[in-house]
Image: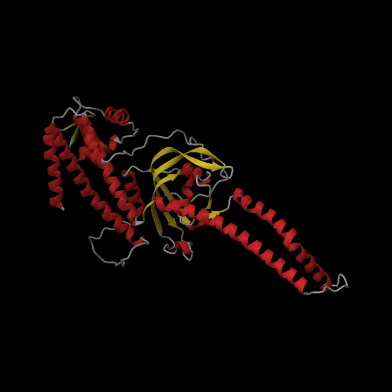
Amino acid sequence: MENVKRKSSVIYDPSDIFLNGNLKDRRFIPFRSVDIIEMCLQDSTLDPVECNLFREISSNIKKLYHFQFHEVMESLKNSYSHQNPDKDTIDVQLPSKNQCISDDFTLLLEGLLNKANYEKLSEIDLDQALHQTSIFKIKLQVNFDDFQQVLFYFRKESVKEENVKTWFGLKTKTVKFINYDRVLVYIKFSDEFSSHKSALRQYKAGSTMLKLFQNVPKADLEMLFPNTKLQMRFLDKLMIGVPAAISGGIVLATKVGATLILLGSLMGFWLGLHAQPVELDKTALLTLFIGIGALASYLWKQFNNFKNRKLRFMQTLTKNLYFKNLDNNAGVFHRLLDEAEEEECKEAILAYYFLLIQSQPQSLESLDALIEQWFKESWKQSVNFEVDDAIEKLIKIELVVEENSLLRAIPLKQADLQINKIWNNALSSN
């Protein structure tokens, strides 16, 4: 976990999508595990009986990983319980020898994110994101003094296009930007954080916040912070200030001018600058009240213009956050557990299948190339397949054998017996 860094003075253009080089292939496999099984069998040389046996083995692999991830879920729940701001239960300290609670929630979370194939946002990328112009044409300010640690993870980045209005809505232009399909935000509040702030009352000094969002432009990561404040851009100030100055001049010349002259005469008489008294008859008093009323009305109108424009920006921010938010706090790692389980299963099923259909044992490199080429040619997807991780899982459950740095899958019938044996042993030991 990195400490919070201060912003630099560098400003980046959101249309510059190659600031950090071309987009890299990511580990995330953008298909469901049940679809991966059928995708493998679509052009398979296996006969119908073997296809059904492969489906059964794949289903048992999924059950096995679901069973194993249950233990991970319990560890995460226990380690997060004392810092969960949404809990409705009472913490009880019991001297139980069997109570295994990890104090390092961040290590468990980072391990889970890695299994779910999330990528850590580098400091360079985060710094660029915080200084790019917002896609939604709003200016945001974040008080980083509230935080001790900030962590961003994302999964599946892509280049998207958006039509934005320019020249006061008279023109539109197409802007390209980097979009993150999933973004996880982990924030630990500083020990000096004061929770009296209305928007953050549920958080205390030293507590943590977890949030998961979808479809977030890189240039708008600032809006994911809990203490984000809206500020007027220079252009917005001009759009309010220039018409206000013009209309103010007209009001002064037509409605307030006579009142100012009258007030000036009164002040001059009271200060002894001239001896001639000012007669306050009905006409003079009416002029005075009309001028004061016109000035007050003008000031109130300009104040409302400012508040209404800021309110529109707030509505834009709230609307986008509402539809982008997926989960908060404990709900985040429950969703991550499901995603991690899916990714682990997909990797194991793919590696086993592609070894199974090869006539010769394969090296790690050749197997990796086979699967990545299959994704590109058959499904038009660039995936950086984690072959090491997949093979490690399969060797552990003895569905793959390694001989002289070459890998081969055990036959389907043998694999079916093996996975059932492991599954039964797991249930018995539990």
Residue 142 in view: no
Give above or below for 412 relative to 421. Answer: above
- Asked if residue 284 lies left or right of residue 232, the reply is right
Find the residue positioned furthest to the right. 275
Q: Quadrant of residue 387?
A: top left
Question: Could you say where residue 189 lies in the image, as x and y percent from the top left?
Answer: 44, 58
- The front one of 217 and 396 is 217
Question: Could you say where residue 16 lies in the image, as x and y percent from the top left?
Answer: 51, 36
- Asked if residue 164 lies left or right of residue 418, the reply is right
Find the residue positioned furthest to the front. 283
Residue sitting at 36 percent across and 62 percent down?
Answer: 86
Residue 24 in view: yes
Residue sitting at 36 percent across and 37 percent down?
Answer: 26
- The front one of 358 and 379 is 379
- The front one of 281 and 369 is 281
Question: Could you say where residue 144 lies in the image, as x and y percent from the top left?
Answer: 50, 54
Question: Could you say where residue 112 lies in the image, as x and y percent from the top left?
Answer: 32, 48
Report the label total. 0
- The front one of 266 and 387 is 266
Residue sitting at 62 percent across and 63 percent down?
Answer: 300
- Asked if residue 361 lies left or right of residue 383, the reply is left
Q: Quadrant of residue 265?
A: bottom right
Residue sitting at 34 percent across and 33 percent down?
Answer: 381
